[in-house]
C-alpha cells in the first residue's frame, strides 16, 4: 500500500499530543476537539500491551466510547503483540481537503482529520508504526511496517474493538463457505445484545452498528488492496470485545493463502470506528471513502451514473433471448433510464447476436451493461461467460471488444472470498476496465472499502441481501421490511449498494411491503447505477405520478440528510440533486405509523411538493401536490410495512 503524507502541519499542543520520549500515552483530538483517540502502553501486567481507547471530551467529564482495546499484529517471523517500547512519536498533522465524486451521498466531500504516527518496537527491537486519525465523528488506525523493516507474512491480527455492553447491535453473520458464499448476503441481526455470539462459527461481518448509551458506533475497514486480506470479526465477543478475523482457509475453493505476504514499506487497511450521538452523522458519513487514495484516473468524463432496467428478476432465462432483452431496452428508453443490464448466459443468446442487441440499444440511447462470472478456479458456478475475468490477457481483450461495441459497463459476479489474491482480482478488473472506459459493478462480492474514490468507474457493489431473494428465499418477504430500514445505517453507509429495488409485482415469494414502500427505496437506498428489478409491464402500468417519479429520480446526489428513524423500525432519508429534493420513508413494522416530516432541510424558496403515499390497500398508491417551505411540517401516515416518496421542486 502507498503511504500518503498528510497535507499540512497542524499547530501541535503538548498537553493533548505528547511526543516526549518517556511518555506512555498519546492522545489525538478531532479537529473540533470533541472526540479523542488515545494510544497507550498498558504497564499494569508483565506483557506491556499496546492499547487504545476512544473518548468523548466535549463536556465537563470525559466519557469513554470505546473501551481500552488491544492493538497488535502477528507474522510468521515475529509477534508484535506484547512487550512494546516506544521508539519515536511524530508530531500530529492536519488533513483538510475537499474533493469531488461522481457517485454517492454528496458530490463534494470534505476530508478533515488529524493524523499522528507512533513508532514502537517489540521485544526483539523490530519496528511497528501505528498511524491514527481523528475525525469529528470517528477515528481510524492502521499498522505500518516502515522502510528497513523485514518482509513478513501476516498470520493474524490481534486488533480489538471494546464496545460497552449496555446496548444493542445491528450486525450480520459472516457466511459459511458454500458454492455461492461468502458474499455478505445474510440478514443484519436486528438489535441483538452487544456481545451476543454469532449464529455462525465463521463470525460477524463489517460493517457493524452498535447503540450503546447515547452513542452510535459503526465499525468497518477502508483502503484495502491485494497485498492484504479482507477482514471480518470473530464469532465470540466476550464482554463486548470484538476481534478481527482473517478469511476462512476454505474460501475460493481452497485456492490462494488467507495470509498476507508483505513487502516493506507496508500498511494494513484502516480500521474504521464511526462515533456519534446522532445517527445522521453515521448515515451521512463518507469517512470510508476519504480514507482511500485520491482519484487515479485522468479522464472521467465517460463515467455516467444512471438507472438501469433489469430482466433477470422477473425471468431468469431472459438474457438468452434477444426478443426479451429488446423489451427491457425499450422500457429503459421509454422511462428515460440510461442503461439496461444483460445478465448471465448472454453468450448463448437466441435471435439477434449480442452485437446487434448492443447496436439496437445504442440506437435508442440506452447503454448496455454486460454480466460476467469472475471465475476461474476460485469458484464452481457454471453461469457464463466465465474464465475471462480471472485471466489478464483474456480480460483486456474482452474489454477492448466491449469498448469497440459501445458497451458501457460490466457486472462481475461470484467472487466468494476475501483472500488477498481475490482482493487483487477486484482491483485488476477495475483498473483494466478504466483503461477501456468500462464502468464496473461487483456482485456476489465483498463490501465496499472506499475504492470508488481511487477508481470512480466502480459504480456500485452488491454485498447485500437484496430484492433478488424474492425468487428463492421463502423467509425473505417477512424479513425485508425491517431489513430495509437497517441498510441505510449499515451497509449503505460504507458505499453504493446494488439492492435491485422497486419491485411492485411478485416473484416466487410475494412481498408484504406496500408499493409506496417499494417506490421509496429508490431514494432510501443509494447506488451509482440503480437497477430497477421489476418486469416491463409493472412499470408501464404504473399511474402517472409514480411513473414520472421513477423517470426523474436521480441516483447520484449533491447532498444527503437523515431525517429520522430507528434501524429495524423505520427510516426516512432526504437527498438533493441541484435544487430538487427527494424524500423516501419506509415503515419496517407491522403497525401503522404517523411520521412528522419537518421541511427545515429545504432552502429559502417555496417548493412544489409531489407526494406519493400508501393507498387504501398495500398495492395502491395515491398522490397529492402542495406548496411547502422550510417553516412547514407535515404528518404522514405509513401503512404497516408501508412508506412514502416525495419530490420537491423550487417554484418558478
Image (cartoon, rainbow, N blue to C red):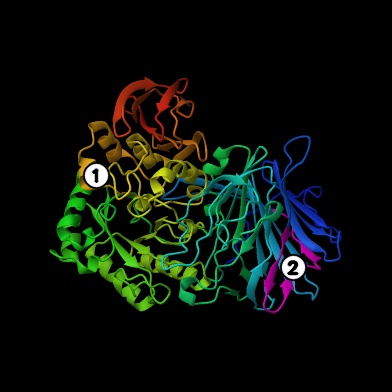
Q: Which residue is mark 1?
A: 336
The answer to whether 539 is drawn above or below residue 429 in the figure is above
For disc 1, the neighbor class at 10 Å (few under 14, some 14 to 19, many from 20) is some
Residue 592 lies in quadrant: top left
Q: Secondary structure at mark 2?
A: loop
Side of 139 where 593 appears, left or right: left
**Do the residues bearing badges 2 and 1 touch, measured as CB atoms within 8 Å?**
no
Side of 455 where 168 appears, left or right: right
Q: Position of residue 273 (x, y in %)?
A: 62, 51
Q: From the image, which quarter does the C terminus lie in?
A: top left
Q: The magenta stretch spans which residues?
A: 70-94
Q: Secondary structure at mark 1?
A: loop
The answer to whether 28 is drawn above or below residue 21 in the figure is above
Q: Which residue is mark 2?
A: 81
For disc 2, the neighbor class at 10 Å (few under 14, some 14 to 19, many from 20) is many
The answer to whether 118 is drawn above or below residue 283 in the figure is below
* Residue at the image position 31 percent from the left and 30 percent from the top: 617
Q: From the image, which quarter does the N terminus lie in?
A: bottom right
> Is residue 37 shown to the viewer in this render?
no
Side of 163 where 104 appears, left or right: left
Q: Earlier in the sequence, mark 2 or mark 1?
A: 2
Q: Position of residue 62 (x, y in %)?
A: 77, 40
Nearest to viewer (mark 2 / mark 1): 2
Q: Is residue 63 magenta?
A: no
Q: Is residue 89 magenta?
A: yes
* Residue at the image position 79 percent from the left and 57 percent from the top: 40
Q: What is the CA distance from the residue labelled 2 to the residue labelled 1?
A: 57 Å
Residue 444 lies in quadrant: bottom left
* Residue at the image position 23 percent from the left and 52 percent from the top: 366
Which of the two residues, 168 or 299, is positioned nearer the viewer here? Answer: 168
> Is residue 275 shown to the viewer in this render?
yes
Amino acid at each position: 500500500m502507498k503511504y500518503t503524507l498528510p497535507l499540512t502541519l497542524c499547530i501541535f499542543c503538548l498537553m493533548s499530543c505528547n511526543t516526549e520520549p518517556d511518555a506512555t500515552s498519546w492522545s489525538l483530538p478531532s479537529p473540533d476537539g470533541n472526540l479523542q483517540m488515545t494510544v497507550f502502553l498498558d504497564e499494569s501486567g508483565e506483557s506491556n500491551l499496546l492499547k487504545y481507547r476512544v473518548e468523548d471530551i466535549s463536556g465537563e467529564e470525559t466519557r469513554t466510547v470505546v473501551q481500552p482495546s488491544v492493538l497488535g499484529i502477528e507474522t510468521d517471523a515475529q509477534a508484535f503483540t506484547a512487550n512494546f517500547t516506544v521508539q519515536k512519536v511524530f508530531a500530529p498533522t492536519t488533513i483538510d481537503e475537499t474533493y469531488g465524486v461522481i457517485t454517492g451521498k454528496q458530490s463534494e466531500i470534505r476530508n478533515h482529520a488529524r493524523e499522528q504516527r507512533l513508532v514502537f518496537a517489540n521485544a526483539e527491537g523490530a519496528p511497528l508504526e501505528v498511524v491514527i486519525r481523528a475525525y469529528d465523528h470517528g477515528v481510524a488506525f492502521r499498522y505500518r511496517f516502515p522502510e528497513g523493516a523485514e518482509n513478513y507474512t501476516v498470520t493474524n491480527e490481534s486488533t480489538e474493538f471494546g464496545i460497552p455492553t449496555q446496548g444493542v447491535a445491528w450486525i450480520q453473520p459472516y457466511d459459511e463457505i458454500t458454492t455461492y458464499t461468502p458474499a455478505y448476503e445474510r440478514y443484519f441481526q436486528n438489535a441483538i445484545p452487544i456481545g451476543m455470539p454469532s449464529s455462525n462459527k465463521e463470525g460477524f461481518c463489517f460493517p457493524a452498528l452498535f447503540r450503546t448509551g447515547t452513542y452510535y458506533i459503526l465499525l468497518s475497514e477502508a483502503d484495502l488492496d491485494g497485498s492484504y486480506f479482507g477482514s471480518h470479526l470473530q464469532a465470540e465477543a466476550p464482554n463486548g470485545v470484538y476481534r478481527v478475523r482473517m478469511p476462512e482457509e476454505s474460501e475460493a475453493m481452497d485456492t490462494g493463502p488467507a495470509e498476507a505476504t508483505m513487502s516493506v514499506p507496508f500498511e494494513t487497511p484502516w480500521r474504521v470506528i464511526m462515533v456519534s450521538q446522532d445517527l445522521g452523522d453515521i448515515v451521512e458519513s463518507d469517512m470510508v471513502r476519504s480514507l482511500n487514495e485520491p482519484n487515479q484516473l485522468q479522464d472521467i468524463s465517460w463515467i455516467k451514473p444512471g438507472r438501469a432496467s433489469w430482466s433477470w428478476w422477473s425471468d431468469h432465462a431472459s438474457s438468452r433471448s434477444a426478443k426479451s432483452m429488446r423489451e427491457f431496452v425499450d422500457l429503459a428508453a421509454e422511462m428515460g433510464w440510461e442503461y439496461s443490464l444483460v445478465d448471465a448466459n448472454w453468450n448463448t443468446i437466441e435471435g439477434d447476436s449480442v452485437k446487434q442487441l448492443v447496436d439496437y440499444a445504442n440506437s435508442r440511447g440506452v447503454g448496455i451493461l454486460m454480466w460476467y462470472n469472475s471465475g476461474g478456479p476460485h469458484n464452481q458456478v457454471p453461469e457464463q461467460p466465465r474464465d475471462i475475468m480471472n485471466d489478464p490477457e483474456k480480460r483486456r481483450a474482452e474489454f477492448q471488444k466491449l469498448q469497440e461495441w459501445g458497451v458501457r459497463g460490466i457486472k462481475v459476479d461470484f467472487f466468494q472470498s476475501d483472500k488477498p489474491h481475490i482482493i487483487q482480482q477486484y482491483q485488476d478488473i477495475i483498473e483494466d476496465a478504466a483503461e477501456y472506459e468500462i464502468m464496473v459493478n461487483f456482485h456476489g462480492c465483498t463490501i465496499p472499502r472506499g475504492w470508488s474514490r481511487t477508481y470512480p468507474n466502480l459504480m456500485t457493489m452488491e454485498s447485500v441481501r437484496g430484492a433478488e431473494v424474492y425468487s428463492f428465499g421463502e423467509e425473505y418477504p417477512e424479513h425485508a421490511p425491517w431489513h430495509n430500514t437497517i441498510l441505510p445505517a449499515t451497509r449503505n453507509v460504507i458505499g453504493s449498494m446494488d439492492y435491485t429495488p422497486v419491485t411492485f409485482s411478485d416473484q416466487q415469494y410475494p412481498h408484504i411491503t406496500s408499493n409506496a414502500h417499494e417506490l421509496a427505496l429508490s431514494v432510501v437506498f443509494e447506488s451509482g447505477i440503480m437497477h430497477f428489478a421489476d418486469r416491463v409491464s409493472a412499470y408501464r402500468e404504473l399511474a402517472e405520478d409514480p411513473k414520472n417519479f421513477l423517470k426523474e429520480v436521480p441516483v447520484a446526489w449533491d447532498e444527503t440528510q437523515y431525517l429520522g428513524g430507528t434501524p429495524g423500525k423505520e427510516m426516512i432519508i432526504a437527498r438533493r440533486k441541484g435544487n430538487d429534493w427527494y424524500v423516501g420513508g419506509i415503515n419496517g413494522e407491522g403497525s401503522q405509523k404517523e411520521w412528522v416530516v419537518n421541511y427545515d432541510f429545504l432552502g429559502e424558496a417555496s417548493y412544489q411538493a409531489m407526494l406519493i403515499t400508501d393507498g387504501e390497500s398495500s398495492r395502491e398508491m395515491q398522490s397529492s401536490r402542495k406548496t411547502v417551505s422550510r417553516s412547514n411540517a407535515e404528518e404522514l401516515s405509513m401503512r404497516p410495512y408501508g412508506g412514502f416518496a416525495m419530490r420537491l421542486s423550487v417554484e418558478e
